[in-house]
Image (tube, rainbow, N blue to C red):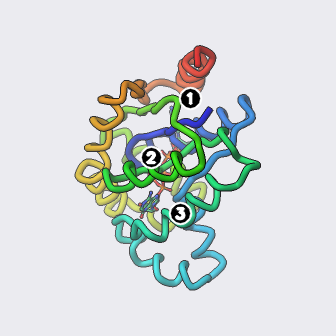
Amino acid sequence: MNLIIFGPPGAGKGTQSKFIAENFNLFQLSTGEFLRKEIVDNTEIGKKISSIINSGSLVSDNIVSDLIEKIISNTKFNNRIIFDGYPRSLAQARNLDFLLKKYNQKINVVLKLSVSLETVKKRISERRALEKREDDNEEIAIKRYKTYEKSTEPVIEYYKKMNLLKVIDGERTIDQINKEISDIIALI
Ligand code: AP5
Ligand code: MG
C-alpha cells in the first residue's frame, strides 16, 4: 500500500505519517525533512535550496523528483510508502504517476487534512518554540500557506477525479485523527 498525506503547513502531516508508518510498517517519505537534511549537511543541493525554503516557496521539481525516485525505485520500500508533502503541484502529481508506473506501483489512498489558517498559525508558533525550524515564523508560515493554496490545492481535484481522496477534519485531536486514518487504512 502506498498513500499520500496532504494538507497545509502545520496540518499534522508529519505527526500522522509517523504514527501510520509505525503502526502499518510503512516508510515515511517527507520531502520537507529530506530537504532540511540537505541544508543541515551543507550539500550542494542544501546550498541551493535554503533560501527557497526560507522564503516559503517550492523547491524545483527536478530536485524533489530525484529524491522521490531514489525511494520509489528501492525495493526495500516497494509498495509501502507514505508520501508526506509530495506531490505539491499538478506537475508533481503527474510525475509521481509516471514514476509509480515505471516501478509498477500505485497510490491506494490520498488523505487530505483540512485545517484553517488560524490553526496553522497557532500550531506553527507552538512548534517553533520546540523545534526551531527556520521557516516557522509567522510571516513565512503565511507564505507557505499561500503557496499551498495556489500550487497544491489544485492537486486535490486530480485525486478526487481518480476516486482516491478522503478528506479528514484536521482540527480535532491527534488521537481522533489517528483513529479515523487507521479505520480508513484497515479497509484497504
Ligand atoms: P514541509 O516540511 O513539508 O512543511 P509543510 O508542508 O509546511 O508542513 P509542516 O511540516 O510544517 O507541517 P505538518 O503538516 O507536517 O504538521 P506537523 O505534523 O509537523 O515542507 C517545507 C518546505 O520544503 C516547503 O515550504 C518547500 O519549500 C519545501 N518542499 C517540501 N516538499 C516539497 C515538494 N514536494 N516540492 C517542492 N518543495 C518542497 O504538525 C505541526 C505542529 O502541530 C506540531 O508541533 C504538532 O505536534 C502539532 N499538531 C499536529 N497535529 C495536531 C492536532 N491534531 N492537534 C494539535 N496539534 C497538532
Ligand atoms: Mg511536516
Q: Nearer the viewer, mark 2 or mark 1?
A: 2
Residue at mark 2 to residue at mark 1: CA–CA distance: 30 Å
> What whole-number distance in Å separates the C-alpha atoms at marks 2 and 3?
31 Å
Q: Please state which amino acid type lies under the numbered disc 2.
A: Asp
* Residue at x 58% of width, y 19% of height: 188
Q: Quadrant of the image for the N terminus?
A: top right
Q: Secondary structure at mark 2?
A: helix
Q: Position of residue 9 (x, y in %)?
A: 41, 49
Seen in the picture, residue 5 relative to 145 is either above or below; the reply is above
Q: How many marks?
A: 3
Amino acid bearing label 3: Arg
| C-alpha span from label 3 to label 1 | 21 Å
Using the image, determine if residue 135 lies above or below residue 76: below
Q: Are marks 3 and 1 in contact (CB under 8 Å)?
A: no
Residue 57 in view (yes/no): yes
In the image, residue 107 sits, relative to residue 68, either above or below, namely above
Q: Is residue 145 left or right of residue 188?
A: left
Q: Which residue is mark 1?
A: 174
Mark 3 close to ligand 1, CB under 8 Å: yes
Q: Is mark 1 within 8 Å of ligand 1?
A: yes
What's the residue type where badge 1 is placed?
A: Ile
Mark linked to residue 97: 2
Residue at figure coordinates x 73%, y 50% from the top left: 75
179 w.r.t. 13: above or below: above
> Which residue appears at 44% of the width and 46% of the height?
97
Measured as percent of width and height from the top left, residue 36 is found at 57, 67
- Residue closer to the observer: 74 or 176: 74
Q: In this rendering, would 12 be left or right of 146?
A: right
Q: Earlier in the sequence, mark 2 or mark 1?
A: 2
Label 2, ligand 1: CB separation under 8 Å: no
